[in-house]
Image (cartoon, rainbow, N blue to C red):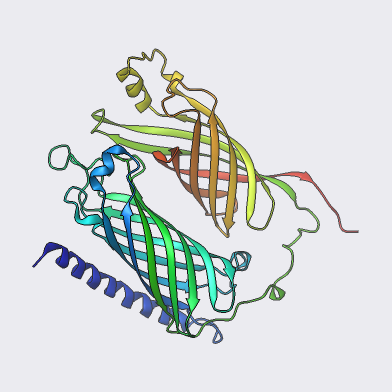
Amino acid sequence: MDHSIIKISALLRSVGIILIITIKANLASAQFEHKLFSSNLIVEGKVHYGFLYAQHLELEYFNAHFPVFELDIQQLTYGKRQWERDYNYPIIGIAMLYSGLGNNPSLGSALAMMPYINFPLYKTKNLTAGFRFALGPGYITHPFDRITNYKNLAIGSHLNAAVNLMAEVRYRINYFLSATVGLSLQHFSNGSLKQPNYGINAMLINVGLAYRPFKENQNIDDRFFAPTQPFSAIIRKTIEVNIGGYAGYKNMQAVYGKSFWVSHFYGTSFLQVSPKSKFGIGIDCSYDPSQIQWLELHGIPVNNKMSILRPGINAAYQLGMSRLAFIFNLGYYLGGKEKSNGPLYEKISVQYGFTKKLYASVMIKVHWGRADYIGWGLGYRFDVLYGKKTVK
């Protein structure tokens, strides 16, 4: 029997087991909820078709058109939490994805399991247009090996980050069935944890069918909640300050024969402009020892290791959802001896608050779409009061 058929069969069996366990778990948890509420579970299948986008000349070797198969387990939000109403009742879920990536023997196949959130941008009774952001672990079967698979310059490791950005339209056929169509970008990368790491990008179009086996909860309107947070009418003019640090790891055995640890420290101040959004400015400084190797390889001596310190200033945007926050930074380097990446940089990070002040964070630093490194860290946030208003 063909190996690809065996792989697909094994994948479908695994997905079936996960689906059965998830449905049973939702049914069990629903017994403990209020009798007016259900699990709001949705099961959806999607078929994508598209092509690899070769962002580097070395990736032209992988050009191909291919299908991608996806199974989703979703849940409709109905306003049980404040952020669900703020974002117009999005859909949250997990996507399980498989593709042969054009059956190139040097690239192999791709698997991913990506939690996601689907934000409605336009909504009527039967039609919803929205944007989906998915992020989770991905697996590439044939990564780079300098002896057995030297042609794969796209991915240097089995385990990667899988990211999916999708514009989607959903049409409700009847109470239980919905049809979907969308355009998406699927990305696999290890964030330079292991070189080479050009990354895999696929442009895809998809169609899908969603089935809701249980009764849908009615949205909870704002009239059931206080219009303001406690004490917000008395004191509520503050600037949020975040300080913290990251540690990153770069496996560059294939390039320099060694690995490196990267240090990154930052401070950012935010001003809240809406229940969802905050804008701010920040400063940061990173130390990346792999830059010494790059400079010396290009004939630039490094007499002082501190000369590779890279301070920067950046503009910041924060999108908050309860304890979870997404941070986007666009920065400009103020110094540093290594200048091959140019003066601009981008950072994308996800924060999760253990308490109101302490949070954990994962960050990826990027130079014009090329990942530099992934950092894991802790941070501390506090508020600085800059004004008062009193109730007369």
Q: Is residue 156 visible?
A: no
Q: Is residue 230 above or below residue 32?
A: above
User: Residue 319, percent across and down?
Assistant: 58, 53
Quarter of the figure that contains the N terminus: bottom left
Left or right position of 114 against 148: right
Q: Could you tell me how many numbered marks the image carries? A: 0
Q: Residue furthest left?
A: 1
User: Residue 350, percent across and down?
Assistant: 49, 50
Q: Is residue 42 above or below residue 10?
A: below
User: Residue 50, percent across and down?
Assistant: 33, 58
Residues 122 and 391: in front is 122
Q: Residue at x 45, y 18 (%)?
A: 307
Q: Residue at x 40, y 66 (%)?
A: 94
Residues 372 and 64: in front is 64
Q: Is residue 66 visible?
A: yes
Q: Residue at x 31, y 54 (%)?
A: 51
User: Residue 389, percent across and down?
Assistant: 84, 52
Residues 239 and 207: in front is 207
Quarter of the figure that contains the C terminus: bottom right
Residues 354 and 251: in front is 251
Q: Residue at x 78, y 53 (%)?
A: 235
